Image (spheres, rainbow, N blue to C red):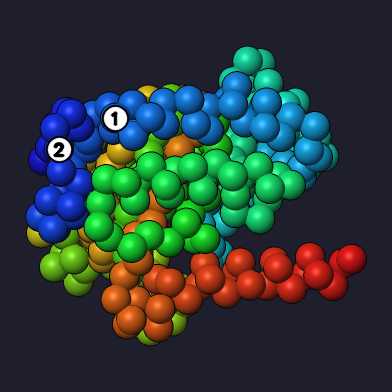
Amino acid sequence: MEIDRIPADGVVLDEVLDAGRPVILEGLLEILDLGDVATPDALARAAGDQRIRVASYDASSPYFLYSGGYDSTVVDRRETSVSGFLHTMFDEGVEPGTVVYQLFGIRSLGGATAAILDRVDRAVRAHTSRSTEPRFSGIWVGSAGATTPLHHDAWPGLLMQTHGRKRVALYRPSDRTNLSFRVPLRGAGRWSDLPGRSGDASPEDFPRLRHADRHVGELRTGDALYIPPFWAHEMEAVEANVSIPFRFAGGVSTYFNPGFLRPASEMLRKQVDAVAAR
């Protein structure tokens, strides 16, 4: 079934969050005065000279995830400037047979990411009474085909599409038993053992999947997808694109859930490594 698409003009964001179902808010970034945030040009202006490490992956397994698996294969690693990376992604195009994706956390790009997320946070808080978690948001840049496999998060969030298009698929929390999720209460417990693109799952290998209701849609530049907590979701880039997964605060139990603990521990490890390298 199709995810509802509604014009963001006149929408009360708190009511969307309270409804507890996914919805695509058309043009929300313009309503929030964020139409120029985290676009390729904006990123180049903000951090063009910053040096980053970029990996290219075999397009037959183009999957991004925190907890490993899916046998993603690195075919190249190189250092480049942010502006060079963006030129490759959005002007030249990546090498045939490869995908490239980059996730910029809040401490990346010499403060540029933090400044962007701070602007997004101020804009969102002006339109909602909900507490936000900009520390655990980020900026995602991916080439066509880059896929985030099926998983759930313990917090509500807005996936903001600042450039390009991506396909999304979601499943209700009540469908978890039909989605081949891994053992709960572990860091990998929020990821499914379905193929990286769950729509390719064999009915013979995953017979329970036919009982699950699949909700699908396409995010376009300026759209935002509301993802309620524990709704399983996956994404695939239709073309080179940029998006911001923006998080709201959950309840106290959220912070003890594997859906939170794994990325939080990854961020802490990177911070410790960065301090140790100084």
Relative horizontal placement of residue 97, taking residue 246 as reference (left or right): right
Closest to the observer, 87 or 179: 87
Q: Residue drawn 68% across and 26% down?
A: 45
Q: Which image quarter: residue 112?
A: top right
The x, y position of residue 155, in whole percent, is 32, 65
Single out the residue that lies furthest toward the top.
91
Task: Determine if residue 119 is in view.
Answer: yes
Q: Which image quarter: residue 11?
A: top left
Disc 2 to disc 1, how far (Cα)? Answer: 10 Å
The x, y position of residue 36, in whole percent, is 48, 25
Closest to the observer, 84 or 168: 84
Marks 1 and 2: in contact by CB < 8 Å? yes
Which secondary structure, mark 1?
helix
The x, y position of residue 13, in whole percent, is 20, 46
Q: Residue drawn 42% across and 47% down?
A: 122
Relative horizontal placement of residue 109, taking residue 230 as reference (left or right): right
Please name the residue that numbered disc 2 is placed on: 11
Q: Does residue 249 sit above or below 140 in this rendering? A: below
The x, y position of residue 150, in whole percent, is 35, 56
The quarter of the image holding the N terminus is top left
Single out the residue that lies furthest toward the front.
126
Closest to the observer, 210 or 67: 67
Please name the residue that numbered disc 1 is placed on: 31
Task: Determine if residue 96 is in view.
Answer: no
Q: Say the numbered circle drawn on residue 267.
A: none
Q: Residue drawn 55% across and 37% down?
A: 141
Which amino acid, by three-letter code, is at mark 2?
Val
Which secondary structure, mark 2?
loop
Q: Does residue 20 sit above or below 218 in this rendering? A: below
Relative horizontal placement of residue 130, taking residue 257 as reference (left or right): left
Which amino acid, by three-letter code, is at mark 1?
Ile
